Image (spheres, rainbow, N blue to C red):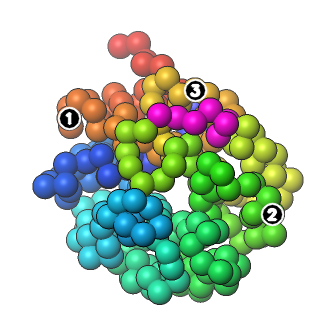
Amino acid sequence: MSHNIKIAPSILSADFAALGEEVRAIDAAGADFIHVDVMDGHFVPNLTIGPGVVNALRPHSDKIFDVHLMISPADPYLQAFADAGADILTVHPEAGPHLHRTLQTIKSLGKKAGVSLNPATPVDSIAHVMDMVDLILVMSVNPGFGGQSFIPSALDKLRRLRTMIEASGRDILLEVDGGVDRTTAGQVITAGADVLVAGTATFRGGPAAYAENITALRQGGKVLAA
């Protein structure tokens, strides 16, 4: 199963003084996606980056830019992030009054559409948009800051969503973000996740460690024998 697992390092944990170099380093180390956490200091209690940074980073990697919009409202910024080079735009159901319309807009921009579920957001909130989503992101921490501890109830949510995805008959990625490390990677993979977002666990140890960190996460937390 591990050969299908995709690793999406979160640049929130990268060295912000050298983001271009960091993106090139995780690309070379085997990252599948580049996960970009966009926070507005309103929807979540932190302020990170905008479309300009995404645009500046785009030339540094051909990998999929997986842009998680933790902003409200999201709709006014979809075009800007699409133009900046996002490949996947992920929004929260709580970030706007009309999730279906938001997903329609993302699709109209030629991008993949994702929906993110916070720890208290029920899986049923996306039951009626399963025909539109390309990615479902389960937050296994409360969004806003890196380095938080994994919330175990996310495992049941992943299992339920995996069942919903299989019932839909569609090729929908199931992603998990928050406290994913060598201890929890195997648990979330077993529960049905196929994309693992990892910030601290990817960037720990500096560039020389990135390849081993990514490989270990992909293998469910196990370090391959030399």
For the N terminus, the quadrant is top right
Please state if 101 lies on the left or on the right of 195 as rendered: right
Q: Which residue is mark 2?
A: 127
Can residue 58 be seen by looking at this rendering? no
Residue type beneath disc 1: Gly
Q: Which residue is mark 1?
A: 206
Mark 1 or mark 3, earlier in chain: 3
The local secondary structure at tag 1 comes to loop
Q: Residue at x 51, y 69 (%)?
A: 89
Q: Which residues are magenta?
A: 149-155
Please state if 122 lies on the left or on the right of 115 as rendered: right
Please state if 197 lies on the left or on the right of 98 as rendered: left
Q: Residue at x 67, y 76 (%)?
A: 99
Residue type beneath disc 2: Ala
Q: Is residue 152 magenta?
A: yes
Q: Position of residue 48 (x, y in %)?
A: 31, 63
Q: Which residue is mark 3?
A: 186
Q: Residue at x 76, y 70 (%)?
A: 129
Mark 3 or mark 2, earlier in chain: 2
Q: Are marks 3 and 2 in contact (CB under 8 Å)?
A: no
Residue type beneath disc 3: Gly
Q: Position of residue 162 (x, y in %)?
A: 75, 46
Label 3: few (<14), some (14–19) or many (≥20) C-alpha neighbours in 10 Å: many
